[in-house]
Amino acid sequence: MFLHLPQRNVHPRDQGWQNGHLRENHRTGESGPVENIEKTGTYSWHGDHSYVLATATNMLSDEQGRKYMVFRVGATLHVVSFGDTATAEPTVKEIPLAGTTSSISDFAHISLRNNILEATFNTFESTNSYLTYWIDMASNSMIAYTDTARPAQSLLRAGDSMLYVTKYDYTGSELTMLTPQSDGTVQVTYSKGTAQLLETQSGTPVIVPLSGTGEGYFTDPVTGKQGRSALFVQGKTLEQAILTHSGTSSGTSSTAQEPWTYKVVPATRSTLVAQTHDVMAATVMDNAAYMLTVELEDKPENAEARYFITRFDAKGKQNGRVQLNDPTLFDDSYSKTFNLQAAPNGYLALVCRQIHDRTEILRTITTLISSDMKTVSVTGIDPRQQAIGWLYGRWAYVTPATSETAGMRLNYAMTKILDVSPSPVPPSDPSTPDKPSAPESRQQGNAATATKALMRTGTAVPFMLAIALALAGVTVLTVAKASSRRQRK
């Protein structure tokens, strides 16, 4: 049985697309030049042929920054560890899954922390439910898994636990937390926090505080200003705080304690985006943090959403900002999940996974933003069954493919090197007095005038890369429509 869902394939009739690529940006009247894929090929690793189509995750990193991807064929996980260069042969470890796997579909979440791999899968159930596995990578053995699917609006990891956000509104998040135990069981705890919860590419949880009542929604509880704070916290600390402020049950119900607030978890770093209404995604590096936010031009009931990415330095001071005008962001017929991925030198990728509310057509649009936030390019359609992410400065696509003659292979397609080290600043001439620099302007405006359509073109692109289905392993941060459609209490 094939594990993909053919009805979710992107069809050329889909709004906003033509001949498999983005149409002209009708908000700006121009689409810009095309940036082609520079490298395509096949890694030398190969596995056994399978008639079951593989389903793959996004790329992920461990605490040391090593890059991985995971794909599943039947009841076996394949954990791919990439080499020292983008095209070096990877190592692939095969790990059997325990229990029944007949109901699981694509990846919904994947993480690797403390040498424990967590893999959460969508299921074929009609209730939008998930199954989670925990695997000890040192011994390739199963630590625990849930044998009962649970529904969730979004998922993130805190310590060794998985947080299922079962309900989110403008008063906060209701949570079911699943914690693996040494005896193979899974402890279930329930709580509510007066906050929105997100997750960065490195697995750092993000708390966006809310009022808890719905009143004064646009006021940030941390600063008292109009806007939104993002508090980056340690996963283990959040896990312990939720355990302390939770109702615990081995069954399906419990009575939780009073909702917890952002004050129960100390932040390691914080940022504030003034005059914003919703935080859709966030990520953090050693020297920078990024937030994707939605702002409204007018009153919520008649305003159109505007999307911004704002950059902050290590001290939380804003030092960059760009407005996104990709027309697919404003298509209300699609539900959206967002994921920010920053490369080491500051090039940024915004991955937007979109599912049509009626037809379940799926498309993934990746916006690439230069480290100076002046160059913006947008991909076309990403195949479903592939891992995407940064590999040594290149935005890369890696797709499992299988044939009777060649067995299982990993094909790749990569852009040119985009993320490069900044040029050294030449020493100033002591005989020339320094000139005062102009204050940095707030970079809003029309970033889409520099938009490029990044697509795979030319005959060199492998056929399997061109026909693979749209990505499934995107980290689920927030499922959202345009903010103007949300109902605030």
Image (spheres, rainbow, N blue to C red):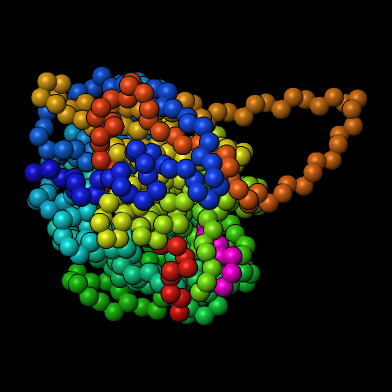
Residue shown at 86% from the left, 36% from the top: 435
160 relative to 329 in the view: left or right: left
Seen in the picture, residue 204 relative to 404 is either above or below; the reply is below
User: Which residue is located at x 41 percent, y 27 percent?
Assistant: 37
| Residue at image location 65% in from the left, 26% down from the top | 423
Nearest the viewer among 449 and 40 is 449
Q: Is residue 6 among what the camera can see?
A: yes
| Relative image position of residue 224 (x, y in whole percent) | 62, 72
Quarter where residue 375 is shown: top right
Whether 427 is among the magenta residues is no
| Residue 371 percent coordinates (x, y) | 58, 37
In this rendering, would 9 be left or right of 236? left
Left or right: 296 in relation to 150: right
Residue sitting nearer the eye, 30 or 299: 30
Quarter of the image for the N terminus: give it: top left
Q: Is residue 159 above or below residue 390?
A: below
| Count of labels in the image | 0
Residue 389 in the image: x percent, y percent? 39, 37
Q: Is residue 2 above or below residue 258?
A: above
The span shown in magenta is 293-299
Quadrant including the C terminus: bottom left
Q: Residue at x 10, y 24 (%)?
A: 404
Q: Quadrant of residue 138?
A: top left
- Can residue 262 be seen in the rendering of this structure? no
As displayed, is residue 249 above or below residue 44?
below
Residue 299: x percent and y percent? Answer: 57, 73
